[in-house]
Image (cartoon, rainbow, N blue to C red):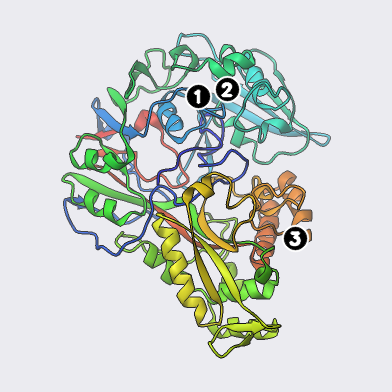
Amino acid sequence: MKPIKIFAPAMLGAAALVLSACGGPAATPSGSAAPGGSSAAPTGGASTPAATSSGWDINEQPRESLAQGGTLRLSVTEMMTNWNGAHVNGNQFDNTQMQAPMAPTYFTFDSGGKPVQNENFLTSYTDEMDGESQVITIKMNEKAVWGDGDPITADDWIATVNALNGKDPAFEAASTEGWKDLKSVEKGANDYEVKFTFTKTYPDWTAIISGGPMRAEAVADANTFNTGWTTLKNEWLSGPYKVESLTADLLTLVPNDKWWGEAPLLDKVTFKAIADDAVASAFANQEIDFLDVGPDPDGYARASATPNTVMRKAAGPNFRHFTFNSEAENLKDVKVRRAIVMGLDREVIAKSDLAGVDWEPKPLNNNIFLPSQPEYVDLGKETGIDYNVEGAKKLLDEAGWTEGADGIREKDGAKLNVKFAALTGVKASENEALQAQNMLKEIGVNLEIVATPVADFTGGKLLEPGNFDITAFSWIGTPYPLRGIDQIYGGSPDNWGSNFARLSNPELNELIPQIAVEPDVAKRNEMGQQAAKLIWESVHTLPLYQRPELVATNGKLANYGAFGLGSPNWVNVGFQS
C-alpha cells in the first residue's frame, strides 16, 4: 500500500509525512508496501551495494564526472487537481515529489538528516534572542527569482506566513505547525532580508524555513490559496527546473532558463502517472528509471531481475510498531504491558516481515530517535525492558496473573485475553499478529486476532475511538525527532490527538513543553533522552524495527536513490557516461 497523503509538504516543511491531517509523525498501515511472504530474492540482473554508513545510498558522484544531458523518468500515482502542497487537498506525497526540482529550497538535508544551507536561495542567517522571543533574520540571495524573472522578496515570506499561521481559518492550510508560533514576520534592512520573531524559542525553526516561501500572489487571498492551483504555473515556482508540459498523465520538466545557480545536468525530468499495480512492470520494461520497492519481497525479486539495475538501500525514516491501548481492561497495568514487550522476540518478527529482501533488521529500542540518528540510545538494554521470557513471566506473577490449567494466565476468575486488530490485506500487520500470538502463548497471554478492514484504519473507526487492545502500523520519522512529541505522546482525555495509546504520563507532560523551547542542542537532546526513557518504561507504544528504504534504479543514475532522512540536490542528479 503506497503512502497516499503527507502532512508537511517538502516545499514548506522538513520532510514528507504520510496519511495524516494532524501534526506530528503520521500513521500509515503498511508504509510504501506491505511486506511479508517467504520468497528468496534472486540474483537476477541487479547489483546490490551494501547500504552506506553515511545514512543514504545514492551513488554519490562529483557532478563534473557525469554526463551532460539525458532524461530521468520517474513515476507517480496520479497528477494533481490541486497543486498547492500547503493546502489540505494538495498535501500529497506525489505532489511533493513532482515539485521538488522546481521549488525554493533554503535548506537541504544531508545523509544524516541535518539541515544544510542552500546558498542559491539563502546567503546567511542569524539566530538571536530578544527577551523571551527567538529572532531569526535571513538574508536571501538577490539573484533568486521566480519563474518569470521577478525577484523573491520579503513580501513573499510575509504572505506565506499570513496564509499558514492559522489566524485566518479561510486559508485551508494542511498544517500551521511552527507558523502559528510566529509573533511577527517583517522586512529587514531591504527587500532581501526577512526577520522572523517567534513568541518564544523555537529550536526547529529550519523545519519551516527550509522549503522557502510561496509567491505572494499565489497566496494573496484564501480563494487563490484554496482553489487557484488547478495547474502548475512557472511564475509561481523557482528552482533549477521548470514545467515544459503537463497532461493528464505526464509532467515534463526542463532546465529553467531563469535559474541563476549551477546548471542542472539533465535535459528533462518526467513524471508519469502509473497505477500502483503497474509500476513494477513499467520498471521491468525499462519505461522508468526508478522504483520504490519498499520492503516487498515480490517487488524486490522482480526489480532485482531487471537488467542494468542497481538496488539501493538505506535505513528509512519509517518504523513498524505496536500501539497498546492503555485503557483496554487487561492492559491498564504497566507490568502487563512490560511483560508483553518482554515476551516478544522482535528480531524474529522483523526478519519474518522482511523475508525475501536484502536487509538485516534489528529491534528498535527507542520511540523518539532512530538508529540512523546519532542521538539514538538502546533503551531496551538500558532499562531491561526487552526480550526476556522468564522476566516476563515474573512480572505477570507480580501483577497477580497465575497460570491456568490451559497455560493461559488468570486473575480474579478472568483470563488474560488481549485483542490484536490485524489489518486485513496488510501482510506486515497480519504476520506480526500471528508471530505475537505464538510468542505470547509462552508467557500465558491469549492474543486474540481480530481481522480489521483497512477502511477502519483510514476512516477513523479504529485508532481514534480506541477500538483495539493492540494494533500495528508504521510511524514516519523526520529529521526533527524532537519536534511535536506531544502529538503522539502527550495529550489528555479531553484531547488525545494522535496519542492513540490513550496514555498520559505526568512527568512526560511536564518535560515535553521544555523540550519544545530549549535552544541548547546538547541539553535538548538530553531532555529528549529522558522523554524517550519515560515513554519506553511506560510502554506507551512498542517500536519493532526501522524499515529499510529499498529502491531500484537505472544502473547509471547518480546522486539519486535511497535517501533515508536526506534530500536530493537536483542540479547534481544525472547519469554516468
Q: Is residue 207 above or below residue 383?
A: above
Q: Which residue is mark 3?
A: 505
Which of the two discs, 2 and 3, sits closer to the camera? Answer: 3
Q: Which residue is mark 2?
A: 213
Badge 1 amino acid:
Pro
Q: Residue furthest right?
A: 131
Sequence-wise, the earlier of marks 1 and 2 is: 1
Cα separation between marks 2 and 3: 38 Å
Q: Is residue 37 visible?
A: yes
Badge 3 amino acid:
Asn
The residue lying toward the viewer, choosing from 110 and 92, is 92
Sequence-wise, the earlier of marks 2 and 3 is: 2
Q: Is residue 151 above or below residue 462?
A: above
Q: Tell me: 30 left or right of 8.
A: left
Q: Secondary structure at mark 3?
A: loop
Cα separation between marks 1 and 2: 7 Å
Sequence-wise, the earlier of marks 3 and 1 is: 1
Residue 503: x and y in percent read: 70, 59
Cα separation between marks 3 and 1: 40 Å
Q: Which residue is mark 1?
A: 104
- Whether pointer 2 and pointer 3 mark residues with C-beta atoms closer than 8 Å, the reply is no
